Amino acid sequence: MNKSAKMASLASALLLTFALTACGQANAPAPEPINVPPNSTQEPPADPAEAEETDPAEPADPADPDGEEVLSATGEYGGQADPHTIEVNVDGTPTSFQLAEGVEAQLDGLNEGDTISFDYVEQKVEGSDVPQLEIRSLHAGGDSTSSGQGTSGAAASTDRPATESFVVGDGESKTLTGELQDGDGYSLYVLDGYTLDASANRLSLTEDPAYYAEIEKLPADYNVDHLRLQGTAELEKAGGTVKEFDSDTLVESPMVNASLFLQGSGADETRDYILWEAEDGSGYIFRLVMPENEDGSPFYMEATTSLSTILGL
């Protein structure tokens, strides 16, 4: 083969190679594009601790403690069953009460039959419909003071001082000390030399109990005219000549403000029937008995000074 023929064969072979290479590249599959949403960026993986981040929980309201309603009552002390239990007759019903810590000391000086006022709570007992009653505080006498309302009768035992000094006498006066004591539904200052029998409602001269004053507490709806008739009949029955005195004739007497003052004078004794309204509005009848004595007696002025301090409980 001559030189020209060889060059033509070589050129043809090169053209065939180029054509096959171009066809192979044209038929190769194109790489698939990555779909990325428009206007977005690819974020790195979130930190696990931050991925589950939540709003902080609001603190729970503290549970309200079981509120125990404090109740108040007045009754007759019936004695101590054991160091933690006493019996109180409330409205005619004997009732057992537990004593809270420290209350036992408040029983000092109490006798069975004494009137007491107390504050207590009702405590639920598991498995029982009957609550346990526990006294939180108590004191001798009437109305409880838990509510802080120190008025009228309650003031007698709580707001008045334990002792007071009184100047007594018609003419030659003297100063006596009175001790605040409780009777049946009332309190008053009992002067030196006198004794108050609360169970009998009798104030007497200690050295001579024949001189005495009986105390009767009246209902709120008492009638003065009715009491005048009653007092007159009592004094006449005792054998005395009855007189009524008004405030003009009682100027020097502690009973100057008495609503009614009747006196029956006999050969052996003098009796007074006095209707008295205390500062708190409670009403009383005082029946004074005074034997005749040639030397006289300070009983009337001293006893009525004491009686004039009476207040209801």
Image: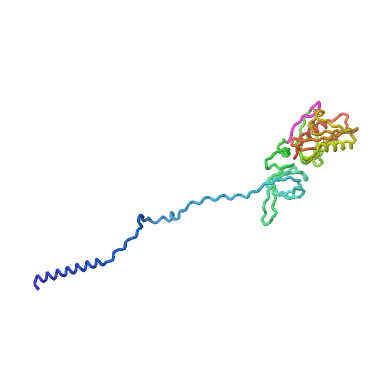
1 sits to left or right of 128:
left
Please determine whether, in this image, residue 1 is positioned above or below residue 199. Answer: below
> Which of the image's four quarters has the C terminus?
top right
- Residue 120 showing in the rendered view: yes
Asked if residue 194 lies in the magenta stretch, the reply is: no
Q: Nearer the viewer, residue 59 or 125?
A: 59
Asked if residue 163 lies in the magenta stretch, the reply is: yes
- Residue 191 showing in the rendered view: no
How far across and down, in percent of the image, does residue 213 sit?
83, 36
Residue at the top extreme, as displayed: 171
Please determine whether, in this image, residue 72 is positioned above or below residue 126. Answer: above
The boundaries of the magenta stretch are 162-173
The part of the image, by quadrant, that contains residue 164 is top right
Please determine whether, in this image, residue 157 is positioned above or below residue 120. Answer: above
The part of the image, by quadrant, that contains residue 49 is bottom left
How far across and down, in percent of the image, does residue 185 sit?
77, 41
What colour scheme does the image use?
rainbow
Residue at the left extreme, as displayed: 2
> Which of the image's four quarters has the N terminus?
bottom left
Residue at the bottom extreme, as displayed: 1
How far across and down, in percent of the image, does residue 266 sit?
90, 33
Report the residue at 76% width, 31% height from top.
166
Q: How many marks?
A: 0
The part of the image, by quadrant, that contains residue 22 is bottom left
